[in-house]
Image (tube, rainbow, N blue to C red):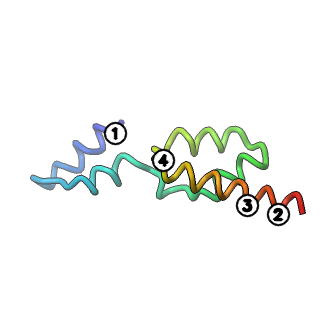
Amino acid sequence: NELKKIDCFLLNKKKVSVEEIYSLTNLSENYSISELVDSCLSKNKIRMHKILNENNFNLEDCIIILRTFLSKLKRLVK
């Protein structure tokens, strides 16, 4: 699917930048980290799996996810 996206994108262009490829293949912009954490905390497995499957998280994203998770959990405990 990702290769098809890039192929369709290249129909109108001769060159493509790394940033453009990254934005085409990484759908993390469609879902916020907060949505992922909220889905997890509300036990919405279907939504959580969908967000996880459609995103390519790097190490920095994982740290942000953990921090967001901890922050929300602390508020819930209070």
Sort mark 2 into few (<14), some (14-19) or many (20+) by Cα contacts within 10 Å: few
How far apart, in angstroms, are the residues tagged by discs 2 and 4?
25 Å
Which residue carries the number 2 mark? 75
- Quick one: SS at disc 2? helix
Query: x, y percentage for residue 78?
Result: 90, 63
- Whichever of labels 4 and 1 marks the residue nearer the N terminus, that label is 1
Residue 73, image quadrant: bottom right
Between residue 37 and residue 61, name the one nearer to us: 61
Disc nearer the start of the sequence (2/4): 4
Q: Which residue, given by chain and number where applicable, does mark 3 sit on?
A: 71
Element type where label 3 sits in the image: helix
Name the amino acid type tagged 3: Ser
Mark 3 touches mark 2? (CB < 8 Å): yes
Could you tell me if the residues under marks 2 and 4 are in contact, i.e. CB atoms within 8 Å?
no
Which residue is situated farthest in the left direction here?
14
Mark 3 packing: few (<14 Cα in 10 Å), some, or many (20+)?
A: few
- Tell me how far mark 1 sits from mark 2, CA to CA: 38 Å
Would residue 23 appear left or right of 8 to someone viewing this image? right
Residue at image x 88%, y 58%? 77
Task: Inspect the image, locate mark 4, and give the three-letter code of the amino acid beneath it.
Answer: Leu
How far is the residue under mark 3 from the one under mark 4?
19 Å
Q: Viewer-nearest of labels 4 and 1?
A: 4
Residue named by callout 1: 2
Q: Secondary structure at mark 4?
A: helix
How far across and how far down the image is residue 43, in percent?
A: 78, 43
Q: Nearer the viewer, residue 21 or 14?
A: 21
Q: Are marks 1 and 2 in contact (CB under 8 Å)?
A: no
Name the kind of residue labelled 2 in the image.
Arg
